[in-house]
Amino acid sequence: MKNIVFDHVVKAYDKNVIVKDLNMEIREGERLILLGPSGCGKSTTLRMIAGLERLSGGNLYMDGRLVNDVPCGERNVSMVFQNYALFPHMTVQSNIVYGLKAHKMDPAEIKTRLSEVLDMLDLKGLEERRPKDLSGGQRQRVALARAVVKRSDYFLLDEPLSNLDAQLRLRARKELVKIHEMYHQTLIYVTHDQIEAMTVGQRIALMHEGKMQMLDTPANVYNRPANVFTAKFIGSPSMNIVGNAGDRQTGGLAAGHVVRIGLPQRIRPSVPGNTPGTHDFAPQAPGKYPGGNRQVRGGLRQPVRRICAGGQYGNYCCKRGGCPCSGRERIHPAGF
């Protein structure tokens, strides 16, 4: 099986521990997204798979083989770097086939693979150009082509779309999914962009401060977060988290000292009496005006402080009695 298994893996630089006791299996042929804020250890995790970083502790298995001391050239991986890492003095064609020639592949096979990948990534006619003569989107496709043409068992991508504009990112995400569906490689994709994670990934591994927070499908990560960090990191605007205590008389929750949140009748019996803790709620509102209130799920009504336009939807921010919240609402053509 072309899977990858992390067994209590640790990575540290002197006393600075970057990855802490990581245990995870990446299944054969899946698209796994390593997601998290900057500095959480996701790129370091990817580089350990590639063999560019040595483990400080634990074991890493690829295809059932212990690879702690296996050099990167013997791991059968292809990698796309954030800055593309193209050879500036080589043409597009030479950049793409460099690895194949280094492995002394048959020239006829190299020509066949080159033609195939040029068609796939719309690079026909650019073969003799150098990287300085290409746009950002074209350089990104050349870097992808260089990785795809190798047909490795493992396809590693370190924030490859971060330098592209919004429209190119959307197109590139579709191309990545199409490439994976053609070759069924084990694909590991690093990003801090949750939209990329939700649209590209079959599973998401969410990391924070070197620790795995949640590993599940995009739907479950979004709808059933495992902890408060996951709930606040996923979604735009993020889920609202407030301190609360159960109120048996009203069957609701007391958020802070001022706001009381009513709960649907079907879940009231499960509310513990006077039990402190945290509760999450997602504001959902009718209404079309910035000066009024927003009725959120659970019966909480709050004054709107700010509305930020975002195309079809607008985000709004509220605050009342020390209980801030935010939500999203469809913008009508006539405005608010």
Image (tube, grey):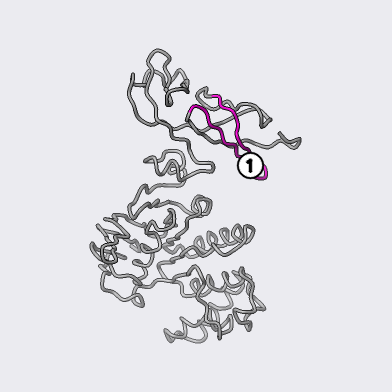
The correct choice, above or below, for 325 with respect to 104 in the image is: above
The C terminus sits in image quarter: top right
Q: Which residue type does callout 1 highlight? A: Cys
Identify which residue is drawn at 40% across, 51% down: 206
Residue 44 image offset from top left, x and y in percent: 37, 64
Q: Is residue 160 left or right of residue 36?
A: right
Task: Answer few, some or many: residues within 10 Å of disc 1's Cα (few below 14, many 20 plus, some between 14 and 19).
Answer: few
Identify which residue is drawn at 43% across, 14% down: 250
The N terminus sits in image quarter: bottom left
Residue 171 image offset from top left, x and y in percent: 61, 60
Say which element carries label 1.
strand
Residue 306 image offset from top left, x and y in percent: 61, 37
The correct choice, above or below, for 230 with respect to 32 in the image is: above
**Chief secondary structure of the magenta span?**
strand
Mark 1, residue position: 308
Identify which residue is drawn at 47% across, 20% down: 262
Magenta residue check for 193:
no
User: Toward the viewer: 25 or 19?
Assistant: 19
Where are the magenta residues, as a range? 301-321
The quarter of the picture where residue 313 lies is: top right
The quarter of the picture where residue 68 lies is: bottom left
In the image as oriented, which residue stretches furthest toward the right? 334
User: Toward the viewer: 79 or 153?
Assistant: 79
Residue 263 image offset from top left, x and y in percent: 46, 21
Identify which residue is drawn at 65% across, 79% down: 133
